Image (cartoon, rainbow, N blue to C red):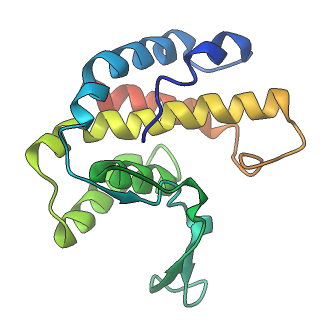
Amino acid sequence: DLQVPRPAPIIPLVPGLPSLDFLQTFIDLFTARIAPRLARLRHQFVHSDFTARNILVKSRQSSHVVGINGFGAGVHTALVIDVAAGVTGQLADSETAQQTVREFVDAYCEVEPLHKEELSVLNWLIAGRIVLETVLTAWQRVHSPSGGHFGGADPRSSGWKVEFAKHLISV
């Protein structure tokens, strides 16, 4: 499940988080407004870590997917969380972020159309993934700087991603 409320207690313990007030407010709003709605949505197994490092393609220049690995974060939860996880894993920069979301969601919906209620929470779920990634990556860097799961994440991306999350829920 999308565990947005879980990092709330560690936010004050992580120095240098971008937009600290937004992160805390987002978690409170998500917990009150979005989390209760998730139980009413369609559920399925969700990979939950659908990033470029877990997508196997035929060759480096190919977009032909031949496999997926990294099922350790898999969970049974709302189907739309799979879309949010997939989109977030493909965000490369601020200039293409909106287009990436649109293209990913359109492609997903060609195969499995999202329902109205799922679409109504999608931006919040994408923003939630960004908030989780931002807090957990910063926590990892402070408390376990030798690497780990978040070792490959670019710390410079947190700022623009948080700004994008703000945009997503203000629309």
Q: Position of residue 63 (x, y in %)?
A: 46, 82
Relative height, residue 53 to residue 24 (above, below): below
Q: Residue at 35% across / 22% down in the picture?
A: 30
Relative image position of residue 122 (x, y in whole percent): 27, 41
- In the rendered image, residue 91, in percent from the top left (x then y), is placed at 48, 51
170 sits to left or right of 147: left
Q: Quadrant of the N terminus?
A: top left
The residue sitting at 51% across, 30% down in the picture is 131
Within the image, what quadrant is residue 108 found in? bottom left
- Residue lying furthest left in this view? 116
User: In the rendered view, would you say 29 is above or below 106?
Assistant: above
Q: Position of residue 18 (x, y in %)?
A: 60, 20
Whether 164 is drawn above or below 27: the answer is below
Any part of residue 75 in sight: yes
- 46 sits to left or right of 42: right
Residue closer to the observer: 165 or 136: 136
| Residue most extreme to the bottom | 58
Q: Is residue 43 left or right of residue 113?
A: right
